Amino acid sequence: MIQVNGLIKDYGVRRALDSITFDANQGEIVGFLGPNGAGKTTTMRILTGYMPPTGGEAIVAGYDVVEESLEVRKRVGYLPETVPLYNDMTALDYLKYMAELRQIPHADDRAWETLEMVDLDERANSFIGNFSKGMRQRVGLAQALLHRPEVIILDEPTIGLDPAQVVEVRRVIREIGRDRTVLFSTHILSEAQQICDRVLIINKGKIVAEDTPENLQSRVLGAERVLLRVRGDGDGLAETVKSIKGTRKVAAQDDTSVEFELSAGQDVRPQVAKAVVQAGYELLEMRPVGMSLEEIFLELTDDKTAGKRS
Amino acid sequence: MRNIWTIAKREYDQYFVSPVAYVVAFAILLTSGVLFAINFYFFAQNAFQNFGAVPDFAPISGTFVFLLVLSTPALTMRLISDEARMGTLELLLTAPIRDYELVIGKWLGAMLYILSLLVVTLIYPIVTSRFVTPGIDWSVILTSYLGMILLAGVFLALGTAVSAMFTNQITAFFVSLALFITLWWLVGFPANVVTGDSARLFEYLDMKTHFYGALDSGVINLSDIVYYVSLIALGLFTGSAAVEMRRWR
């Protein structure tokens, strides 16, 4: 659905995209992660036919974004970061206008259906200028879904929303991502972890990592880490844990807790729990302390650690 | 074609939710209305003293185009610049419409607005015609309206182009105004001081000379029509190019 090959974009002398290559298949939700100015929006603008690249090629829904820009634009739904709305229009009129521009037959029916999809049918005749940020975001999303595009590109769709709205928008993205290709950018790493099938991490115009959220985690970490905490005195706790086969890198954190790693493929947490209880400790908690995507992200985008790793 | 019409319709509707359109309509219609009344009264008085002539439409059409010079920048300033400021240009430029369709649609929307005003001004010749026997010479009225429509077309096309070049609509307003003043008043001046072909060139470039004493007097010259139509084409082409340029920035 999306094939990007050696894409380059220069703004004057500054190189915003430095030969990036990736693809996204149908029914796949791909998260685009990166700090501000990394090139996320630039990539999206090229893929939606808004601006031409300086070099390389991008094929979206089977069409070249430069040579067959109009065909690409017919098949792509795009929600830019600054949600493009007309405040003097009602939600329904706005969608009808966009439906007419996209030459969708029965524009009126389609506008209603799409408003229902984003739960705004009750406010169809209210002016967009009076909408809350969450509602505006949903109108923008409706605009991107209006023509039932094969590829949907969303630039920071959850930014500035309150938690309930974030949950709602994520639900819609997951729903539409079932049979379409969704590419969306975000700052929020846990969001990518929750919705994406695959994550692309981009920094300074280059893709620094590309994998499923789970694989990214284990790639950096190697294995799963567990924290174990007991009540009162934890003397000798580390030794008890060490005695169980399948644990490694056992390290006491403080008087009452111990952190250890599980050897690959061996989940010996039940055995550890049993041993600890049998040794007379009062077990309070045992939980995974997997490196969060945040930490991975920082590690991958930080120059110093990136240098160390490569 | 359909996209052009969709955009034009939206633009036309939008004029009626913005105060600018009402201010412009008020200014143009009030001024031309007052002028018509005075003009009409003057000719009527003369007629009572038995040396009356048929009231002339030229002062009305002349005033109308003069007011176009000053007011069309206000009508075109936000056409594209405001879309850029609000971020909705990104929406239009990623929709399956061509850049020139956007520009022509915007221009056409503004044209429809001016045409609505022109329809209202039809009341002046109609009233005049009812009071004079055997009626007025409609061919002069017809060419005057053709001239006013062409001039409006030129101002709006150039204004749309300027609006496409700027993101700030106030800048677009003043740049358009300066351009129109130059084309309307200043470009003809050198014709008075130079002679020969260059004088004729400046005379040809002067927008006034193609209207006053020509279209407003019932005379249709092909060169006048060509002049106006090429300026409209130039405006629309420059506008499309300016929109395209935005993609490369």
Image (cartoon, coloured by chain):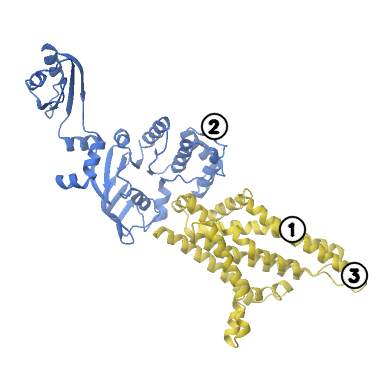
Q: Are marks 2 and 3 in contact (CB under 8 Å)?
A: no
Shade of chain A as shown in the rendered figure: blue
Residue located beneath label 2 in the image: A122
Of residues B86 and A75, which is closer to you in this image?
Answer: B86
Distance between the Cα atoms at labels 2 and 3? 66 Å
Residue located beneath label 1 in the image: B30
Q: Residues within 10 Å of mark 1 (few under 14, many from 20)?
A: few
Q: Position of residue B49 (x, y in %)?
A: 93, 71
SS at mark 2 in the image: helix
SS at mark 1 in the image: helix
Q: Are marks 1 and 2 in contact (CB under 8 Å)?
A: no
Q: From this viewpoint, is residue A55 visible?
A: no
Q: Residues within 10 Å of mark 3 (few under 14, many from 20)?
A: some
Mark 2, chain letter? Answer: A
Shade of chain B as shown in the rendered figure: yellow
Pointer 1 and pointer 2 on the same chain: no
Amino acid at dot 3: Ala
Residue located beneath label 3 in the image: B47
Position of B235 with respect to A206 (left or right) is right
Dividing the picture into quarters, in which one does residue A211 lie? top left
Dividing the picture into quarters, in which one does residue A166 lie? top left
Q: Which quadrant would the N terminus of chain B be assigned to in this image? A: bottom right
Amino acid at dot 2: Glu
Distance between the Cα atoms at labels 3 and 1? 25 Å
Residue at 86%, 72% in the rendered image = B53
